[in-house]
């Protein structure tokens, strides 16, 4: 067996964090057991910057970065990547443009070169942009027919009215149609720069070599015009239950998403809420909700909860896929579980189980380069501290059933929920 | 003995495979049964998958309520999968907690309860699982193609089973299926991770050797001869997007041609790896079909791939059609590319590139202990572990002439089913407020 001394969770002892003069933060954790390297990162140019008539602009820009640069065409970029079995991709969230890639360790300089070219010198070739637009529009047409996507999209819009968290980062058909190539250039010019850019590198590479590769490709990048995000509107919880059903004819199953606001990632009660969420709808076979909806009632294959915590707020969601005839019963069962969850403390045994789960699963969640890279990125994004994993067990163990109840009562009001379903017309239920 | 595999067979016929990997304090434990939808027939399709669900419903020693909690409490993950040829269960645990997984799997090889009430409750869960899939156009298309591609062979039916059968299967059907196939002489136990192989073998002897062998389970399926004429199916459904899927009857995994066709697929639609847990993929934007279909705006996306199976199954090419184009245009372009592979030799550089991609995908997947253990038993289900060990080597041995030959043989149009999903057209979305 590996001895505890060789069991090494990432921490300040083996993770290097440094800031370049131009504002780029680099985190590196070598893993010489691995012949490959993962890179992950973001820069603060997310969909919160989208103009309301051009929703999807940040995401469109992200996807367009690799459609051609000043040095390489689309096919040349992907030929370089795919020939060595590497990958690289961009996306967008509300706050950030995100990127991720992996390669064999010897190809890291190439991967960083391609990353830097895409970030710094995209040329948005007209024909490629139109091709990409058609792909995005098709994706939106598919989304419009996806019961889970439509329930989730509508849930977000009702939970976060007038806030970027309530808007889809991939936009709507009419807003994607409106975006011009000039908009992409302007967005890139205003929002892409080294300030706030974070890059995490994990795998079979030394700290010095990785650092030099980043400095060589991104160290001299400057953009004095890079815009800072203005404060976003205040988020307030719903005051009464809002219920919507999206009709998607021809579907066999109805997808349900219901819930309320959750803590922001930095909130002091985040960990208590997170353990509570585990008890409510994750632990074992999807927690209490899974037990009631699936195991005891056989109403759904999937019925679980999720706690999504971001910079400014979060969402606490229950989702399930049910036969249309069982929708009302599933909603009732879930609400009654939420009432119980907000009116009495979880048992010591339940909390102990979830605490053991949170602590025990760390080695498994951190075994791969991508697992470590994702965790380090979160640590940086939410400023959790490089010793996060080293003090984690202690913090998890400190939470009490009373803490969980208080967090539940703070966020969940069973009489003021957003409840959205998407599927066939309700009165045509089988 | 790092990097080598200890393989042995216990007296009761159970095959054991052990691979020490000391990079993280984890062990992944898998039990594989040679039973899947390949061993089923109407009116009892879906039995193997349903039995898999029932395996989570408890034994006298490990009631369901205990099972659900113990493994996550110890920081482990567990799950199960049912496929055409096999059913498998795994637990990946911190190394010092693996005992539980061994005891649990040995126990439920024989002692699952199949409580009649639980059977009924699971019936609606499985129907719900199927209805969730039916919401997806590509599930419906894939199912229709499988139906059309096989007349007699059980690969005709989706693993989850026909809905009609899911309504009528009884507790006795399930229990009989379980008792027929869940015997050590029809199973493989594979572990990879942070253990000493000899010590682990002694432990496995203790847990598993006491289980009695059963009569050899029946596997009546016989491969079906190749199609002699192209088959075409069309189905309609909601949405605005047209999908085209070409499914060619493919070689079984153990056949030599499987490797040549794997290389061909890498060139035609992009590389596909054998990773099941993490590792990610490689994009396919320089593949021949992407360039000829997506870059020419006939399609939005192109995917392709083949499953490693015991009997010949299907090589699929799936296309999302561009909204301004018809599937006929895309089909003509695919045929043109396949014709090119049949008429001209590919370059050895292209093959070398496909091999490098396969190597990279293995490197990515090998970071996860769970993948490493998965690979051990997986290949046993349709060949032997040597199949897996020699995988890259055998890709490397493929010549341009091999690729041309398999293109001519396996991608002949009379061997395929062409399936199209046609959208019914615009259906404005409505909102019901309450």
Image (cartoon, rainbow, N blue to C red):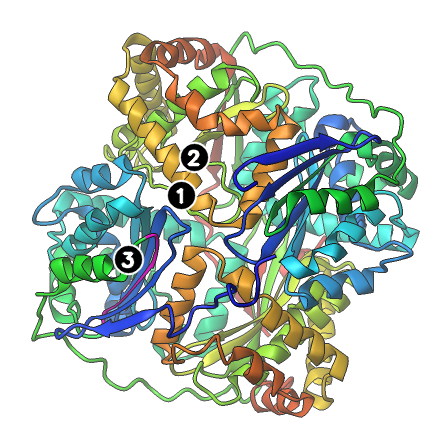
First along the sequence among labels 2 and 1: 2
Which one is nearer the viewer's eye here, B52 or B21?
Answer: B21
Disc 2 vs disc 1: Cβ atoms closer than 8 Å? yes
Residue receiving disc 2:
B272
Res B281 label: 1
| Chain containing mark 1 | B
**Residue B357 colored in magenta in the image:** no
Q: Which residues are drawn in magenta? A: A197-204
Closer mark to the observer between disc 2 and disc 3: 3
| Most common SS among magenta residues | strand
Task: Tell me the residue at 52%/41% (across/down).
Answer: B137
Asked if labels 3 and 1 share a chain, the reply is no
Callout 3: few (<14), some (14-19), or many (20+) C-alpha neighbours within 10 Å?
some
Relative to the observer, which residue lies in front, B316 or A152? Answer: B316
A42 in relation to A277, above or below: above
Task: Classify residue A165 by image quadrant.
Answer: bottom left
Q: Position of residue A333 (x, y in %)?
A: 74, 73
Examine the rendering and report whether any part of residue B131 can be seen.
yes
* Quadrant of the image occupied by residue A47: bottom left
Between marks 2 and 3, how big is the CA–CA gap?
A: 30 Å
Which residue has dot 3 on it? A206
- When asked about the image quadrant of residue A219, the answer is bottom left
Q: Is residue B142 left or right of residue B343?
A: right
| Subunit that carries the residue with mark 2 | B
Q: Nearer the viewer, mark 3 or mark 1?
A: 3
């Amino acid at each position: 067996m590996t001895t505890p001394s060789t069991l090494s969770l990432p921490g300040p002892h083996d993770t290097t964090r440094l800031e370049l003069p131009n504002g780029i933060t680099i985190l590196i954790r070598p893993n010489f057991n691995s012949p490959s390297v993962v890179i992950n990162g973001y820069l603060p140019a997310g969909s919160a910057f989208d103009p309301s008539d051009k929703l999807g602009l940040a995401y469109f820009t992200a996807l367009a970065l690799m459609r051609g640069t000043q040095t390489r065409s689309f096919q040349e970029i992907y030929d370089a990547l795919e020939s060595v079995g590497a990958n690289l991709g961009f996306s967008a969230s509300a706050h950030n443009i995100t990127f991720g890639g992996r390669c064999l360790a010897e190809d890291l300089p190439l991967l960083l070169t391609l990353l830097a070219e895409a970030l710094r010198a995209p040329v948005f070739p007209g024909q490629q942009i139109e091709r990409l637009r058609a792909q995005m529009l098709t994706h939106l047409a598919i989304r419009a027919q996806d019961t889970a996507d439509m329930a989730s999209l509508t849930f977000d819009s009702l939970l976060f009215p007038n806030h970027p968290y309530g808007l889809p980062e991939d936009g709507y058909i009419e807003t994607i149609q409106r975006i011009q190539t000039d908009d992409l250039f302007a967005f890139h010019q205003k929002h892409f720069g080294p300030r706030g850019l974070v890059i995490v590198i994990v795998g079979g590479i030394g700290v010095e070599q990785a650092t030099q590769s980043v400095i060589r490709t991104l160290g001299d990048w400057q953009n004095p015009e890079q815009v800072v995000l203005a404060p976003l509107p205040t988020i307030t919880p719903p005051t009464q239950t809002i219920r919507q059903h999206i009709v998607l004819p021809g579907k066999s199953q109805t997808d349900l998403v219901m819930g309320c606001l959750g803590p922001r990632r930095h909130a002091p009660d985040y960990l208590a809420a997170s353990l509570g969420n585990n008890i409510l709808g994750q632990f074992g076979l999807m927690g209490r909700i899974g037990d009631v909806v699936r195991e005891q009632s056989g109403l759904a294959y999937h019925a679980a909860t999720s706690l999504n915590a971001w910079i400014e707020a979060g969402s606490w969601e229950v989702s399930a896929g049910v036969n249309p005839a069982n929708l009302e019963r599933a909603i009732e069962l879930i609400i009654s579980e939420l009432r119980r969850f907000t009116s009495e403390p979880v048992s010591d045994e339940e909390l102990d189980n979830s605490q053991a789960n949170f602590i025990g699963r760390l080695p498994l969640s951190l075994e791969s380069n991508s697992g470590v890279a994702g965790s380090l990125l979160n640590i940086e994004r939410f400023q959790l501290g490089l010793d996060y994993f080293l003090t984690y067990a202690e913090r998890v163990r400190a939470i009490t059933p009373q803490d969980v109840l208080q967090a539940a009562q703070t966020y969940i009001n069973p009489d003021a929920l957003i409840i959205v379903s998407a599927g066939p017309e309700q009165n045509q239920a089988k | 003995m790092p990097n080598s595999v200890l393989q042995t067979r216990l007296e009761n016929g159970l095959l054991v495979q052990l691979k020490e990997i000391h990079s993280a304090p984890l062990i992944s434990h898998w039990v594989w049964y040679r039973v899947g939808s390949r061993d089923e027939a109407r009116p009892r399709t879906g039995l193997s998958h349903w039995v898999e669900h029932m395996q989570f419903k408890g034994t006298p020693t490990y009631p369901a309520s205990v099972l659900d909690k113990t493994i996550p409490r110890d920081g482990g993950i567990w799950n199960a999968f049912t496929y055409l040829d096999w059913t498998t269960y795994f637990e990946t645990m911190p190394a010092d907690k693996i005992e539980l997984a061994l005891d649990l799997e040995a126990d439920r090889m024989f002692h699952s309860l199949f409580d009649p009430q639980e059977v009924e409750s699971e019936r609606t869960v499985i129907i719900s699982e199927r209805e969730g899939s039916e919401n997806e156009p590509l599930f419906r298309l894939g199912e229709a193609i499988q139906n059309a591609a096989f007349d007699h062979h059980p690969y005709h039916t989706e693993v989850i089973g026909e809905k009609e059968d899911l309504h009528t299967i009884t507790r006795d059907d399930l229990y009989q299926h379980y008792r027929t196939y869940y015997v050590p002489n029809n199973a493989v136990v594979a572990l990879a991770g942070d253990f000493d192989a000899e010590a682990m073998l002694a432990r496995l002897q203790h847990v598993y050797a006491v289980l009695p062998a059963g009569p050899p389970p029946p596997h009546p399926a016989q491969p079906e001869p190749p199609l002699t004429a192209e088959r075409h199916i069309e189905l309609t459904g909601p949405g605005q997007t047209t999908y085209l899927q070409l499914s060619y009857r493919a070689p079984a995994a153990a056949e030599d041609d499987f490797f040549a066709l794997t290389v061909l697929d890498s060139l035609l639609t992009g590389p596909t790896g054998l990773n099941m847990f993490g590792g990610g993929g490689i994009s396919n934007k320089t593949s021949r079909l992407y360039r000829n279909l997506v870059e020419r705006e006939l399609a939005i996306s192109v995917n392709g791939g083949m499953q490693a199976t015991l009997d010949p199954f299907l090589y699929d090419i799936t296309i999302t059609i561009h909204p301004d184009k018809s599937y006929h245009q895309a089909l003509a372009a695919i045929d043109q590319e396949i014709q090119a592979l049949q008429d001209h030799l590919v370059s050895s550089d292209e093959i070398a590139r496909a091999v490098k991609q396969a190597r990279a995908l293995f490197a990515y997947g090998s970071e996860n202990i769970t993948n490493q253990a998965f690979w051990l038993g997986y290949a046993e289900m349709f060949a032997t572990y040597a199949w897996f060990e020699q995988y890259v080597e055998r890709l490397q041995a493929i010549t341009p002439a091999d690729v041309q030959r398999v293109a001519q043989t396996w991608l002949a149009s009379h061997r395929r089913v062409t399936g199209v999903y046609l959208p019914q057209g615009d259906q404005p979305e409505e909102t019901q407020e309450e």
